[in-house]
Each structure stands twice: as structure tokens, then as C-alpha cells.
């Protein structure tokens, strides 16, 4: 067999050697390396799970304290539709926005909470509408913007286009016992 190998040309010997090495590598991978890699991944996953179990009491305590903070902030936050309307009105005036409509509030009970939703339609520049959203939600923390729908509309009488945004503002109230 080796006699025949020695009689082959140099390129053929090279290709046969490379094929043999590749075949040996595939066999070694299938018999040993593959199982080792699978077990290594399994070991790492188990280590992550073990560290999560060790940190579980601390994580539970942290989440419990966050829940208590949310409950206390919910009780502190007093919802007043008139105050919300006045704040939206003055902020829109400051930002050169036009209030197209302030819809009726809707209330929905969900367990121990009542979700109050107000719909506000505003017209103006995109950047100014984003400033309004930021001021209501982040700066004043007066309400939560659940949804904002932007639409480009045409005014046929004045022959111009404008940006109309419909904002859905939500407040959470504890349900009255």
C-alpha cells in the first residue's frame, strides 16, 4: 500500500495526505471533541443557574422593595383630570402646539387598580410633540403616555399639511374598597 503511495505524483500524495488528515480529524471530533463541547456548554449553563439560585433571595428582596415603592408612589399620585388638562394646555401653548381635542376619559378596572385613559389630539411639529410627551411623562410624572399615533394630514381650506398626534395618557388609581 505504501509502495503504491510512493509511486504517485507529488500533488496526488498531497491530496491523499490532506484527505487522510481530514478524515482523522472528523473521526476525532465525532468520538471525543463533540461530546466535550456539549458537556462544557451544559456545565456553563448549570453554573449560571447555580449563581442565579444563590442570588435569588437578594433579587427577591430587591423586587419586593421596588414593588413597595411603586405601591407607595401609586397612593401618593393623585389623579386630577382638570390638572392634567391645564398642564397639557399650558405646555402646548409654551411649545406652540395646537390642541385639536381632549376626549372623554375611559376607566377600566383591572384587579386592584383602575386604569384611567385620556385621549388628547395635538397638532404641531414632531420635535415639539416629543417635548410634550417627555415633559408629561418624565419631568412632571403626571401621567404615562401609553400610545402616540402620528399622522400627516392635509388641510384643504388652507392648502397645507400638518402633523396630528393622538396621545393616549394613562393613570393608575387604586380601586376604591
Image (cartoon, rainbow, N blue to C red):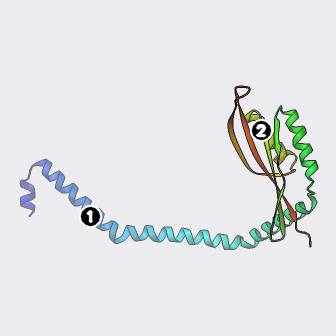
* Disc 1, SS: helix
Q: Which residue is mark 1?
A: 24
- Residue ranking furthest to the front: 157
- In this view, 106 is above or below 91: below
- In this view, 108 is above or below 138: below
- In this view, 136 is above or below 38: above
* Image coords of residue 66 (percent x, y): 82, 64
| Quadrant housing residue 128 | top right
* Image coords of residue 19 (percent x, y): 21, 57
Kindly tell me whether residue 34 is visible in this rendering: yes
Nearer-the-camera pick, 103 or 20: 103
Residue drawn at 48 percent across, 68 percent down: 40
Residue drawn at 77 percent across, 33 percent down: 124
| Image marks 1 and 2: residues in contact by CB distance under 8 Å | no
C-alpha separation, residue under disc 1 versus residue under disc 2: 67 Å
Label annotation for residue 146: none
Q: Which residue is mark 2?
A: 129
Kindly tell me whether residue 69 is visible in this rendering: no
Among the two numbered marks 1 and 2 on one chain, the one whose residue lies closer to the N terminus:
1
* Disc 2, SS: helix
Q: Judge from the rendering whether residue 167 lies leftward or rightward of residue 83; answer left or right.
A: left
- Residue ranking furthest to the top: 159
Which quarter shows the N terminus?
A: bottom left
* Image coords of residue 24 (percent x, y): 26, 64
Residue drawn at 74 percent across, 34 percent down: 127
* Image coords of residue 29 (percent x, y): 34, 66
Amino acid at each position: 500500500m505504501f509502495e503504491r503511495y510512493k509511486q504517485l505524483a507529488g500533488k496526488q500524495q498531497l491530496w491523499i495526505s490532506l484527505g487522510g488528515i481530514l478524515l482523522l480529524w472528523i473521526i476525532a471530533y465525532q468520538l471525543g471533541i463533540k461530546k466535550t463541547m456539549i458537556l462544557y456548554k451544559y456545565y456553563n449553563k448549570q453554573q449560571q443557574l447555580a449563581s442565579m439560585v444563590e442570588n435569588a433571595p437578594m433579587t427577591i428582596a430587591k423586587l419586593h422593595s421596588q414593588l413597595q415603592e411603586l405601591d407607595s408612589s401609586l397612593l401618593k399620585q393623585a389623579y386630577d383630570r382638570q390638572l392634567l388638562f391645564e398642564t397639557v394646555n399650558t405646555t402646548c401653548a409654551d411649545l406652540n402646539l395646537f390642541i385639536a381635542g381632549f376626549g372623554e376619559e375611559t376607566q377600566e378596572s383591572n384587579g386592584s387598580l383602575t386604569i384611567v385613559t385620556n385621549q388628547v389630539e395635538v397638532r404641531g411639529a414632531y420635535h415639539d410633540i416629543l417635548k410634550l410627551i417627555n415633559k408629561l411623562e418624565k419631568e412632571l410624572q403626571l401621567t404615562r403616555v401609553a400610545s402616540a399615533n402620528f399622522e400627516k394630514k392635509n388641510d384643504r381650506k388652507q392648502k397645507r399639511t400638518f402633523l396630528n398626534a393622538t396621545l393616549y395618557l394613562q393613570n393608575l388609581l387604586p380601586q376604591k374598597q
